Amino acid sequence: YREMPQNLGRSRIRNELGLAAKYEWLLFLDCDSRVVTPDFLQAYLAAAKYRQVVVGKRVYAPAPPSEQAFFRWYYGRQREEKPASERNRAPY
């Protein structure tokens, strides 16, 4: 944890933290993330052996949440919760 004198933004702070990392591997988990499988770390470690960058995905609950959070849930289900095979067809 490092507190900055001003808000640098999510991308810049991740870059700063990455530069300050002491070890070979670095794993970022957002504060709203949750580990949903018991083999989470084993799967990432296995993938990291063969790639410099490993990116996971978001998983949303099948049922919509409260009305207040509905739009975020709907957007996420439509845009972010796609299988890797589909995301890889148009990665950018």
Image (cartoon, rainbow, N blue to C red):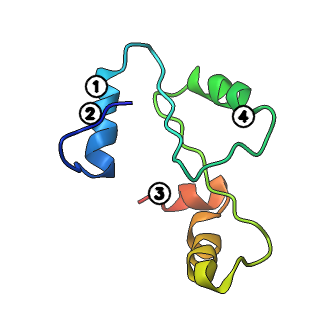
Amino acid carrying label 2: it is Glu
Question: Residue 85, percent across and down?
Answer: 65, 55
Q: Are marks 2 and 1 in contact (CB under 8 Å)?
A: yes
Disc 3 element: loop
The CA span between labels 2 and 4 is 25 Å
Disc 4 element: helix
Q: Indicate which disc, 3 or 4, sits on the residue closer to the N terminus.
A: 4
Q: Horizontally, is 73 left or right of 14 in the view?
A: right
Q: Indicate which disc, 2 or 3, sits on the residue closer to the N terminus.
A: 2
Residue 76, picture quadrant: bottom right
The circle drawn on residue 19 is 1
Residue 37, picture quadrant: top right
**Depth check: 56 or 29 in front?**
29
Q: Indicate which disc, 1 or 4, sits on the residue closer to the N terminus.
A: 1
Amino acid carrying label 4: it is Phe
Against 33, is 45 above or below? above
Question: Residue 10, percent across and down?
Answer: 33, 50
Q: Nearer the viewer, mark 2 or mark 4?
A: 2
**Depth check: 53 or 2 in front?**
2
Residue that badge 2 annotates? 16
Residue that badge 4 annotates? 40
The circle drawn on residue 69 is none
The CA span between labels 3 and 4 is 23 Å
Q: Indicate which disc, 3 or 1, sits on the residue closer to the N terminus.
A: 1
User: Residue at point 56% right, 75% down?
Assistant: 72
Disc 2 element: helix
User: Residue at point 48% right, 20% down?
Assistant: 25
Residue that badge 3 annotates? 91
Amino acid carrying label 1: it is Leu
Disc 1 element: helix
**Depth check: 30 or 85 in front?**
30
Q: Nearer the viewer, mark 3 or mark 4?
A: 4
